[in-house]
Image (cartoon, helix red, strand yellow):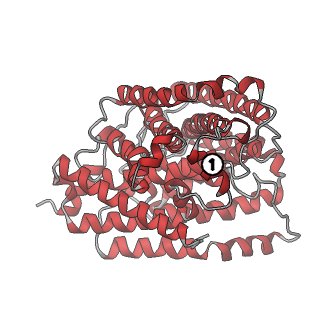
Amino acid sequence: MTTFKEEHEKFIAGHNGTNYLEVAMLTSISCLACFLRDLFFISSIASYVRPKLLAEFLLLIFPNILSVSLLENYLAIFILLIFSVIAIFCFLHWRSITALKNHLHNVNLDEQKKFITYFRSVVIVCTAIAILAVDFPVFPRRFAKTETFGFGGMDIGVGLFVVANAIVSPEARNKYKEKAFLLHHIKSTIVSCLPLIFLGVARLVTVKSIEYHEHVTEYGVHWNFFFTLVALKILLTALYWIVSVNKSTVIAFIVLILHQSLLSNGFSSYIIIGFNNDGTREGLIDANREGIYSLPGYIAIYMFGVQLGRFFFQAQKNLAEWLQVTKAIALQFILFTLALFVTHSFVEPASRRLANASFVFWVMSVSCLMILQLLLADIIITFITSQHWKRKSSSLLQAQQTKRGAKEMCILKAVNYNSLFIFLLANIMTGLVNMAVTTHRIPDKMAIFILTSYMLSLCYISLILYNQNFSLKLS
């Protein structure tokens, strides 16, 4: 007799993924939704919309829910529809946009660099949707995590999370402080990781004690996402004590080449099927081989992300210089994408489980694509709303000008303000939903209702914490 736990684990395991293009389209929908949200709220239409939270939710969050459920077979059409609406809003500001090329030196991005906030928040939002949606039949199985090789929509989540942290790290912002003694440096890092260690242990104990369904080949028997973050912080602390931050790209390639060399010479086989070639696990390290031996790949992702972030924290004086940054990001996107298809075709297929070279290049390719889209949108929005081109007759824009010091209520800014806590809360709520209902037997319409209610709750809690200036720092 198959138990409920075994039935659910079978439902979420054993999948082969989709292709690069579909994952790129999923992330592009998220980025275009951010652009659409900003265009909508600088238009005169926004002044008539109440409540604004619902409008934001429909523009930002709901498209992501639809893209991994009811509209999963119409992603290209959905993107075209969103892009058409964006084109209409841009047409309303056509004079400002066409004048952009003549006044690039007169305007600069906001110091907060909204595109970075949006990227970091989109990663959390998409992850929060996916971790619950995957338990429902409405979620396409090709978007679930792959068993070993392939492009699963959920495979890229952890990699994007690592990039999102790397691009705003002290190393990327040139605020890295070297300490004289390595042990003192590592001790400080471990102390800062205590909340993450606690969360990792708490998740482990909870999952095992209530026999919650789990995908063992994701990280291993005892390992989880929080332990990966802790290990990364400690290893990178030691690594950056030894090498200069300026060498991040070089060291990332060296780590990746060594890692892939081991994988290509038999280590992949060990991670996938174990020493006995039957998938068995003997001992603590062997039991958690996926989580432990994927760390070099995530180290490479982090270091590539640091180098990417360093572009954003240089002193860009105007939009002309930011356009040069977009060219650099576009070039990196092309190079990472080419490297992905070469390694995926001729070295080893992309594998989240192994965090191999093609997986690392996939994560960086998608990250660059998302950041490129968000940065271009930020440049256009910044120019439209700049002091030089504001129309005095626009009451909405005048209100933004007079309240420049006030905190803008935006779901993505609120999520970014407490990103790791929101991710933790999403995991807790996902667990509660799974314990309350038999998710893999829920009809599609009910699944959409549950997902929408769940994300509304997460967004509302995020906004409350943000409005109260209450930030829960877990690392």
Q: Residue 442 vs residue 294: left or right? A: left
Q: Nearer the viewer, residue 102 or 338?
A: 102
Which of the 4 quarters of the picture holds residue 66?
Answer: top left
Quadrant housing the C terminus: bottom right
In the figure, 26 relative to 117: above or below? above
Quadrant housing the N terminus: bottom left
Q: Nearer the viewer, residue 227 or 294?
A: 227
The residue at 55%/42% (across/down) is: 42
Q: Residue 213 vs residue 465: left or right? A: left
Q: Is residue 184 visible?
A: yes
Q: Nearer the viewer, residue 155 or 284?
A: 155
The amino acid pointed to by label 1 is: Gln
Q: Is residue 353 visible?
A: no
Q: Please name the residue that numbered disc 1 is placed on.
A: 398
* Residue furthest right as drawn: 180
In the figure, 157 relative to 340: above or below? below
* Residue furthest left as drawn: 1
Q: Nearer the viewer, residue 318 or 323?
A: 318
Q: Position of residue 162 (x, y in %)?
A: 59, 52
Q: Position of residue 461 (x, y in %)?
A: 44, 67
Q: Residue 456 vs residue 96: left or right? A: left
The residue at 29%/42% (across/down) is: 69
Q: Residues within 10 Å of mark 1 (few under 14, many from 20)?
A: some
The residue at 31%/35% (across/down) is: 72
The secondary structure type at the circle numbered 1 is helix
The residue at 53%/41% (across/down) is: 266
Q: Position of residue 237 (x, y in %)?
A: 74, 62
In the figure, 176 relative to 377: above or below? below
